[in-house]
Structure formats: C-alpha cells, structure tokens
Image (cartoon, rainbow, N blue to C red):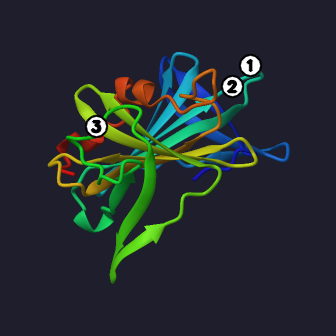
Amino acid sequence: MSDSSKGYQFTFSGNTVVAVYEVERARVKLKRMDRDETWSLDGLDVTRIVTKFGKVQTSVYTDTNRDGVFQKTFEVEVLTGANPHALETYKFSLASGRAATGESVVEGDVITGVMELQRHGWKVDRIDANETFQVFKVNGDSLILRTKTEWSGKIDFSVFRDDDHDGLWTEIADGETFGTFVTPSGVVDLVGIVNAGLLQAADALIA
C-alpha cells in the first residue's frame, strides 16, 4: 500500500490541506489532489480519505520528529459492500476443533485453521510464523484480526466479520501500520481503530 521512504509536505488553510508535496531523495514535487480524495489536518497528523466504488481508504501521515516532513504511518481500506465482487470469504477453525462463528467466538479463542473461498472451492491458508489471529468483541461485534509483522517493522492487518453467524467470515478491511494505532506492546489497536470510526464504512455491509 505505502512507501515508508517517501515523505510529504503540506500547505494548510486552517485544518484544510490545500497543497500536497512529495519529498523523495531531497527533491520536492507537487502532488495532484484528485476529486475522490480529501485531505485534512487532524490534531498533529494529516488524514487522507479516498472514496471509490465499494471501498473507502483512509491514510494517516505523521511528522514524528517535527521537521515538517510527514511519513505515511497508517493506511486502511474498508469495504462498503457496494461491490460484491470485491468481497472475500473465509472459514476459521478453533483450537477446540469447532468452526468459528460470529455468535460462538469469545475473546481469547485461539484460531488454528484458515480456509479461503476461491473460484474453484475452498483452499487452506497456511498460518505463517509471523502471522497471528485474535478474536475481539467490540461494540457488540465479533471481529477476527489477522496481523503479519514484516522485517521492516510494518504490520499488515486484516479484519473479518460474520454478521449472520453462519461461520462464513467476510474480510471487511485490510491495512498496514508503521506505528499508528499500535499499543505499547506492539499489537495493532483494533479497538482504537473502531472507536476512531475507521471501520464505519463497513457498517452497511452484511458479512
């Protein structure tokens, strides 16, 4: 999704971003702002929201050392359900041998198996050594969070929901973080992401 080596500078009018510049190898280049994106100053960070057919993408840019150059530190793409062809379906198995459903899972359940529905049927997804699955209960929703930590420190993550409790989980969001919405212990802060409204675009989706 992102290039962490690329920096950004902004011109502000109040809390509105009126110009975006890309900084790479000490060169500064004006970046065109497209019609489907909005930029704003949110506290000390800059937020970019891109709205496309069936999905909403939110990116956060942070000036960690306060030198005027921002880095992209977080990005999440959330599906709205408007484009059914973009939806991906999964099954999860618990350590007890039971199938995970939105109704039966509780926080702390251990996910031991993953299957993805593909064109020719179900395919087993191997769980890598740097990959974790966690069950969360947030605002009444059962969510499964998948994270994968890369050697660079970047954490890729996906969020799954099973609204009708049939054991078929829809991937409602996927993203990456270089430190934003990460707890002091190095875990993706899913509760913080939800409470910030970053998954709200998926509310209309029936998973």
**C-alpha distance separating marks 2 and 1:** 5 Å
Residue farthest bottom in this picture:
120
Position of residue 64 relative to residue 174, above or below, is above
Residue 77 is left or right of residue 139, and the answer is right
Specify whether residue 200 is in view. yes
Q: What's the distance in space between the residues labelled 3 and 1, CA to CA? A: 38 Å
**Which residue lies under the disc numbered 2?**
63
Task: Tell me the residue that label 1 is attached to.
Answer: 66
Amino acid type, callout 2: Asp
Local crowd size for mark 1, using a 10 Å CA cut-off: few (<14), some (14–19), many (≥20): few
Q: Which mark is residue 142?
A: 3
Which element carries disc 1, helix, strand or loop? Answer: loop
- Specify the quadrant of the image occupied by residue 109: top left
Check contact, mark 2 vs mark 1: CB within 8 A. yes
In the displayed orientation, state which residue is furthest to the right.
26
Can you name the residue that lies furthest to the left here? 164
Most foreground residue, 123 or 23: 123
Task: Report whether 170 appears left or right of 16.
Answer: left
Element at label 3: strand
Q: In this orientation, does residue 36 appear?
A: no
Determine the secondary structure under disc 2: loop
Badge 3 or badge 1: first in the primary sequence? 1
Q: In the picture shown, does residue 186 fall above or below 102?
A: above
Q: Residue at x 54, y 58 (%)?
A: 127
Q: Position of residue 9 (x, y in %)?
A: 67, 33
Query: Looking at the picture, which amino acid does disc 3 mark?
Result: Ser
Seen at 30% across and 49% down, the residue is 100
Comparing labels 3 and 1, the label whose residue is closer to the camera? 3
> Could you tell me the amino acid type at mark 1?
Arg
How would you rate the neighbour count of disc 3 (Cα within 10 Å): few for under 14, some for 14-19, many for 20 or more? many
Earlier residue among tags 3 and 2: 2
